[in-house]
Amino acid sequence: MFLFLLAVGSVQAQTLKNGIGLRLGEPFGITYKHYLPKNKAVEFIVGTAHRGWGNKYYRNYYEEIEKYDDYIYRSHEVKSTVFLEARYLFQYTIPTEDLKGTLQWYWGIGGLLKVARVEYQYEEMVSPNNTFRDERTDIDIGPEAIGGIELTLQNTPVSFFGESSLIFEIVDQPLALRFFGAVGARYNF
């Protein structure tokens, strides 16, 4: 919320410079970046994940749920996943010769909210091995540390980026660390 208010307040004080684009990776989705004065930016991401993403994570999540203590895990299927992210970034120009554009590296902090619907299949430990299905909603919240590189082309309103981030989960599986990576492109206006 703080990042959103910061972005809205800065819009009144300067000419807009924005970028909207596609992000490929974890998560896959839409990215909107608003460039602030003094080499800062705010970014908002709405995304999803491939259904096979996070298999080990959801398998481990099953083991943590007390309800399943007397049952044997068989499988799970991720039905849907939604990511919402907000970030505050610091950008620094990398001096380059003969480059038709601007190359910058950046780092920042942010927050992540992920909501996933997961269906587990499990069975009893004793005969007659009845199979059960159970759908759960997994909600994860945590701070994020980001690092990346961005190339903005000269005379073309397009930029390309590659980045990685580390999420420290504080809600749902406290103390879990998760690594994400992505590449993408934005149209700047």
Image: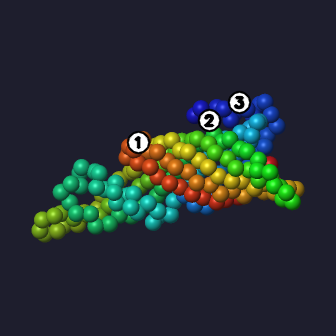
| Quadrant, the N terminus | top right
Q: Residue furthest left?
A: 127
Q: Characterize the local packing of mark 3: few (<14), some (14-19) or many (20 or more) Cα atoms within 10 angstroms.
A: few
Q: Residue furthest bottom?
A: 128
Disc 3 target residue: 9
Toward the viewer: 36 or 95? 95
Task: Name the kind of residue labelled 1 in the image.
Answer: Val
Task: Name the kind of residue labelled 3 in the image.
Answer: Gly
Disc 1 target residue: 171
Q: Are marks 1 and 2 in contact (CB under 8 Å)?
A: no
Q: Kindly report the distance in space between the C-alpha atoms of the residues bearing marks 1 and 2.
A: 20 Å
Label 2's element?
A: helix
Q: Nearer the viewer, mark 1 or mark 3?
A: 1
Asked if residue 42 lies left or right of residue 156, the reply is: left
Task: Name the kind of residue labelled 2 in the image.
Answer: Leu
> Is 16 above or below relative to 181?
above
> x, y percentage for residue 24?
61, 61
- Counting residues from the start of the chain, the first of labels 1 and 2 encountered is 2
- Counting residues from the start of the chain, the first of labels 1 and 3 encountered is 3
Disc 2 target residue: 3
Q: Kindly report the distance in space between the C-alpha atoms of the residues bearing marks 3 and 2.
A: 10 Å
In the image, what residue occupies the spot 13% across and 69% down?
A: 128
Label 3's element?
A: helix
Label 1's element?
A: loop
Quarter holding residue 86: top right
Which numbered tag is attached to residue 115? Answer: none
> x, y percentage for residue 146?
59, 47
Q: Kindly report the distance in space between the C-alpha atoms of the residues bearing marks 1 and 3.
A: 29 Å
> x, y percentage for residue 127?
11, 68
Query: Can residue 69 be seen here?
Result: yes
Asked if residue 70 lies left or right of residue 142, the reply is: left
In the image, what residue occupies the spot 50% across and 54% down?
A: 179
